[in-house]
Image (cartoon, grey):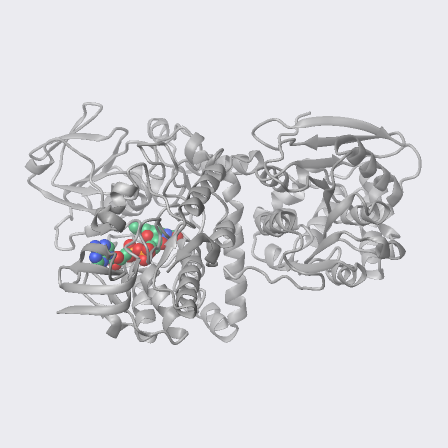
Amino acid sequence: MGVVLTKEPVDEGELVVDGASVRFYDSRESRGSRNPIVLIHGTTGSTAVHFGFLFPMLATRQRVVSIDLGQPTGELTIDSFRRQVEAVIDRVLPDESITLLGYSLGAVVAATVAAARPEKIENLILVAGWAKTDAQQVLRNNVWNALYASGDKDALAQFTVFCAFGHPFVGARTMLELEPAIAAVNVTEFGVAQMRVNRDIDIVDRLGAITANTLVIGCQFDQMVPNRHSLDLFGAIENARYTEIPSGHAVVFERPAELHKHVDNFAADPRRYPAGIRIPAVKP
Amino acid sequence: MTNHTPLLIIGTGFAGIGLATKLKRRGYDDFIMIERADDVGGTWRDNRYPGAACDVPSHLYSYSFALKSDWSRVFAPAPEIWEYIRQCARDEGLMPHIHFNTTLLEASWDEPSALWRVVTSNGEYTADVVVTAMGHLADEKYPAIEGIESFTGEKFHSARWDHDAQLDGKRIAVVGSGASAVQIIPEMAKIAGQLVVFQRSAPYVIPRPDRAYTEAEKRRFARDPESMEALRSEMFWGMENNYAQRRAIPRSIHEAYKVANGHREAQVSDPEILAKVTPDYEIGCKRVLISDVYYPALQAPNVHIEAAALEKVDGKTLISTAGNVYEVDAVIFATGFEAIEPPFAPLIHGRGGQSLSEYWSQGMQALDSTTVTGFPNLFIMNGPNTGLGHNSVIFVIESQIDYIDGALQYMSERGATVLEARPEAEAEYVDAVSDRAAGTVWLNGGCKNWYVDYRTNRLTVTWPDFAYAFRDSNGEFVPEHYLTA
Ligand SMILES: Cc1cc2nc3c(=O)[nH]c(=O)nc-3n(C[C@H](O)[C@H](O)[C@H](O)COP(=O)(O)OP(=O)(O)OC[C@H]3O[C@@H](n4cnc5c(N)ncnc54)[C@H](O)[C@@H]3O)c2cc1C
């Protein structure tokens, strides 16, 4: 399918859920005793775009499955995505307990899966996620929609980069250096539908049902999903620990290795830090 | 007269000085350091060739416990780094501990007395515990070249630069195209009448984002040390991202090629030179070098690049493996260091008189990269599987400092006089490192590098993972890995 995640080819497959085509990738090889980890990308993302670093690096240590969410024929809701993830898990990993990782909108999806299937989701990682959309997010969403409707693709791309990356990251670069990131912004119909879902997320009432060992990762300079949302998740999920990365929302591009470190450590030993703890950053 | 000390640290580079600082700061003060030279600084005392500088940014390539707000540049020149280490040694009160001009000749484990007997060029010592901090790139390596003794001009190694040599306007040869060579060549191009570069294999070279820090920035760092720490963290994790290239991760390797090939093609216009400087192996198999002035220097009118090794010397005539002949007045060897078989290994004898080099006849290995079965109460810094191709070696050194400090504290709490790596723990660690190494570019990249043991094809010099994983694995002493008495 033109998606090259690892040097050795990975298994690929497709499922149809509510009329949506849902692709998945599976590195197969378990390499030890960790639970398989399942990755869910964020808004307008995909496995290749959001997990081009994480998937292959984690696959050097454990089995990794990743999902490309799809657009159903009917109305798109957070539960459409939840069903897609559950369908892939039940197909690919029917007997295993799993570690589930969601990034951004994927974290919202992951939390709903963990709440619905506590027996299945043993460990949960929520990266730059949230539970209830707030006015700051709606304001950004409004501007985004207005730019999209205006047809000014360049303005929309620049606005996206402006919001996605942390201010220290952007501030340390020239406009020329930012050009590739701006050029990479590509909005599809499906992306617009996801932005609509983002507008009124509210999964607050489901969080109490999550029993998984949970790691919440907030991004210190996040302007899309400010990290107070991650702290809310840290408070709402009983068995949660928290850590922070000094990046913007686009942590998968800004600080992929640091993100990998937290995921790798947690996947290896989810209970190394007890619930309620803020895990310190590495002091290099 | 024999000096006795509870702890003998051999070597006063970043490793030795760092360890001594940590011990001193926690109030442990009863140790001696020996150093073969007449000053501290190791690498940065020895490497004083024109153009010498670090290639990890200075705000990261420095101790986390001794941040320096006024680094002059992103990549500080060697003399500034040397002065930094000297300053640390003075500030921490280490100078009185150091016996200079004292070369280790032999260290033997005395089984009945459970201590090390250490013979030096400057007297004998006994020590309960010995730490080797003799470096991994401390002893220069010369290639075997037929007739080299017949050469009548100036000749020296990059790490033993002859500052009295008259090089201006001379015909100079630089042998090598590694990390030191790319720093030296642009400097020699400025002064040589003619310069020839013997290149056995072309390196990948990427841009070097160097610049001077302004006075305002330095003052900001001094006034707001947190911004120094934030910068350090950004640099560290930025470099960690590059580890994915060593694992040949498609997204990362693609970016790496784009940067390296783009730099080469932007800087080299002559198609003949371009062909010579285009590497024929996978990126990262050898160290990826940084320079903005290397390619331009190679295209200067007084510079010639010979894409072949130096094979023979006859008087002032140099002949390459391709049969080309050059007359020169001076030869500079930028041919690297003895890393695979460290020169201190034959000097150290453990239980039963076995030397480390005998124990390592199939390649270096150590438990947690630090201790060796059969060599009790010995800790090795910057030894087996500690090198980093992609990040700061000081991160590794500081991890080892914590490990060794933990071991020393454990011994004193338990009243243990002998601490020795369990053989099964060492074997397990060695297997785990081999697992990490499988699939890295160093083993699969189609090049000859100095990280892999030529006898066994095992990766023994480099740590084959993220730097953070070194600290996770080896940053804390693990009593269960040891036998004590
Ligand atoms: C030119 C150059 C540039 C480098 N740049 C970087 C960089 O940018 N980033 C990076 O991470 N790493 C770099 N390195 C690697 C560098 O070697 C390490 O970062 C670090 O300096 C090693 O410190 P050390 O204390 O282990 O060894 P050293 O600095 O080599 O110190 C060892 C000390 O032991 C002494 N010694 C050796 N044998 C004996 C003996 N028999 N008896 C008594 N004393 C002895 C030596 O004289 C020396 O003082 C560079 C290396 C070189 C050569």
Q: Position of residue B160 (x, y in %)?
A: 19, 51
Q: Position of residue A67 (x, y in %)?
A: 74, 36
Image quarter in which the C terminus of chain B is found: bottom left
Task: Classify residue B64 by image quadrant.
Answer: bottom left
> Which residue sits furthest top?
B323
Residue B478 visible at all? no
Task: Classify residue B282 by image quadrant.
Answer: top left
- Tell me what residue is drawn at x 68 percent, y 49 percent: A161
> Which residue sits furthest right?
A74
Dividing the image into four equal quarters, which quarter contains ligand 1? bottom left
Image quarter in which the N terminus of chain B is found: bottom left
Q: Position of residue B214 (x, y in %)?
A: 44, 66
Q: Between B148 and B138, which is closer to the camera in this rendering?
A: B138
Q: Is residue B347 above or below residue B112?
A: above
Left or right: residue B446 compared with residue A246:
left
Q: Position of residue B110 (x, y in %)?
A: 23, 57
